[in-house]
Image: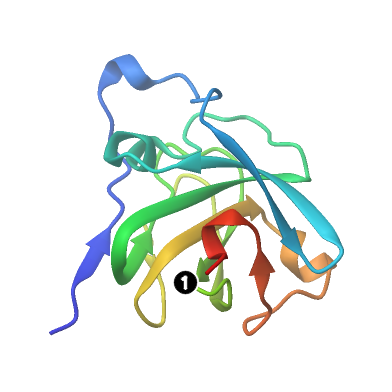
Amino acid sequence: MLAISLMVWTAPARAQQPQMNLPRITLQAGMYQIDTQVAQAPEQRSVGLMWRREMPMHEGMLFVFEQPSTQCFWMMNTLIPLTAAFIADDGTIVNLADMQPQTVNSHCSERPVRFVLEMNQGWFAKRGIKAGARLSGAPFAR
């Protein structure tokens, strides 16, 4: 049976400020470096990039889940257009999904994954990074 994890973009009223102080790591996408905030705890993942009005082009947010599952994201309370990269344990991008701000359309991984990297919409496309490309960095090291 396939478990489905749905990112519910609702958070307590007190959390209506962007979370800017998450731990950071550097990921590599070919020759490109990504300064990545890591959302690992359930509350960090549920808030994600909500309420941000902008994000530098070289930055993103990596969502880390405890075990592989079909991960689904939506964009309620998210103000900037994003692309989600659904990533396998070895760093391989399973699929990419462009997501529009303040919508409730579900965007899901095509197979179970533990990682989702959100970047400004168009970041992957402008660099020719597609499904099947491999990212590197500490989370994907074996």
- Farthest-out residue, front: 142
Identify the residue shown where x is 68% and y is 56%: 121
34 left or right, relative to 110? right
Q: Which quadrant holds residue 39?
A: top left
Helix, strand or loop for disc 1: loop
Q: Judge by depth and name the residue closer to the eye, 22 or 77.
A: 22
Q: Judge by depth and name the residue closer to the eye, 108 or 2.
A: 2
Residue 125 place in picture, x, y as percent: 76, 70
Q: Which residue is mark 1?
A: 89
- Farthest-out residue, left: 1
55 left or right, relative to 72? right
Identify the residue shown where x is 66% and y is 76%: 134
Residue 15 place in picture, x, y as percent: 35, 20
Q: Which quadrant holds residue 27?
A: bottom right
Task: In the rendered view, tell whether residue 104 sits above or below residue 111.
Answer: above
Residue 2 in view in this figure:
yes
Q: Looking at the image, what colour scheme do you see?
A: rainbow
Mark 1 crowd level (few <14, some 14–19, many ≥20, 10 Å Cα): some
Task: In the rendered view, tell whether residue 94 sits above or below residue 78.
Answer: below
Q: Which quadrant holds residue 74?
A: bottom left
